[in-house]
């Protein structure tokens, strides 16, 4: 089963819908499918536009590299689907149905009907050897690019930023420092910047709470037990659907 490219872009560039933000259809249509508590930055939007242009122009090797190495790692389900699609059809890369199946399964983890359909269809066509290979590759991908893995990486990054502020996770406020955000050139007061990071962390914990196996986690960053969260994330990622 092949999904029309235009249709799938409209569906999956939306992201994780109203869980992330309440917005109009126009704003949601601009939302990346990366797993994030905020809208994608301008660089991510530019990369998405560029890779679509490359694919439509037949520049398959370059498009595959970007889908696999720049967009798939941030939880972009459309990009993960496209890696599988290109592997299945030998576009810019040797044909590999087993690996394609693993990427399709990863893209389908949020239950998006279109992705579930293509994933199930391909799985049913695999022989025993290819199914074994698909399982092994799917496990490898889940440990790096599943929603749980991507969220945990973001949470760790937020915590590291707090540790850089005070030497502890959540020290006293009223920071006199000024922060210049690399890449965007935005200048913020220390309080504003770390307040933003705190809100991001809280939102990412809330997103994680909606995943299977995390419904009872604490979403207040001040009460976060990161080691216990890492343990549970490892158990969840290692389970094969």
Image: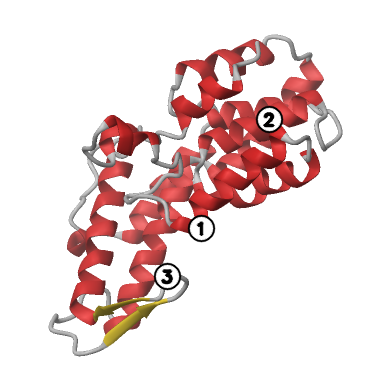
Disc 2 versus disc 3: nearer the observer: 3
User: Quadrant of residue 56 in the image?
Assistant: top right
The one nearer the camera, 141 or 135, is: 141
Check disc 2: other Cα within 10 Å, few if <14, some if 14-19, many if 20+.
many
Residue appearing at x 46%, y 44% in the figure:
34
- Please provide percent x and percent y for residue 149: 48, 48
- Contact, mark 2 vs mark 3 (Cβ under 8 Å): no
Residue appearing at x 51%, y 33% in the figure:
239
Residue 18 relative to residue 140: left or right: left
User: What's the CA distance linking mark 1 and mark 3?
Assistant: 9 Å
Q: Is residue 87 above or below residue 201?
A: above
Check disc 3: other Cα within 10 Å, few if <14, some if 14-19, many if 20+.
few
Residue 54 relative to residue 24: left or right: right
Residue 141 relative to residue 188: left or right: right
User: What's the CA distance linking mark 2 and mark 3?
Assistant: 32 Å
User: Quadrant of residue 4 in the image?
Assistant: top right
- The quarter of the rendered structure image containing the N terminus is top right
The one nearer the camera, 179 or 204, is: 179
Q: Compare marks 2 and 1 and give the one earlier in the sequence.
A: 1
Q: Secondary structure at mark 1?
A: helix
Task: Give the total of numbered labels.
Answer: 3
Q: Secondary structure at mark 2?
A: helix
Residue ID for mark 3: 184
Residue ID for mark 1: 43
Residue ID for mark 2: 84
Q: Compare marks 2 and 3 and give the one earlier in the sequence.
A: 2
């Amino acid at each position: 089963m092949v999904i029309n490219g235009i249709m799938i872009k409209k569906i999956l560039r939306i992201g994780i819908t109203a869980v992330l933000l309440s917005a109009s259809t126009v704003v949601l249509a601009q939302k990346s499918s990366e797993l994030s508590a905020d809208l994608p930055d301008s660089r991510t939007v530019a990369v998405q536009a560029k890779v679509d242009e490359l694919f439509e122009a037949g520049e398959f090797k370059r498009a595959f590299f970007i889908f696999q190495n720049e967009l798939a790692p941030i939880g972009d389900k459309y990009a993960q689907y496209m890696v599988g699609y290109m592997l299945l059809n030998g576009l810019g890369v040797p044909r590999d149905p087993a690996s394609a199946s693993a990427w399709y399964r990863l893209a389908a983890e949020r239950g998006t009907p279109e992705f579930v359909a293509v994933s199930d269809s391909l799985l049913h066509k695999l022989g025993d050897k290819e199914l074994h290979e698909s399982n092994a590759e799917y496990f490898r991908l889940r440990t790096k690019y599943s929603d749980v893995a991507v969220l945990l990486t973001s949470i760790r990054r937020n915590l590291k930023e707090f540790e850089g502020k005070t030497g502890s996770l959540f020290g006293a406020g009223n920071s006199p420092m000024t922060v210049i955000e690399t890449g965007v050139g935005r200048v913020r007061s220390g309080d504003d910047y770390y307040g933003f990071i705190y809100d991001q962390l809280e939102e990412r914990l809330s997103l994680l709470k909606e995943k299977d196996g995390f419904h009872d986690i604490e979403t207040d960053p001040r009460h976060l037990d990161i080691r216990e969260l890492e343990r549970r994330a490892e158990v969840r990622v290692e389970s094969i659907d």
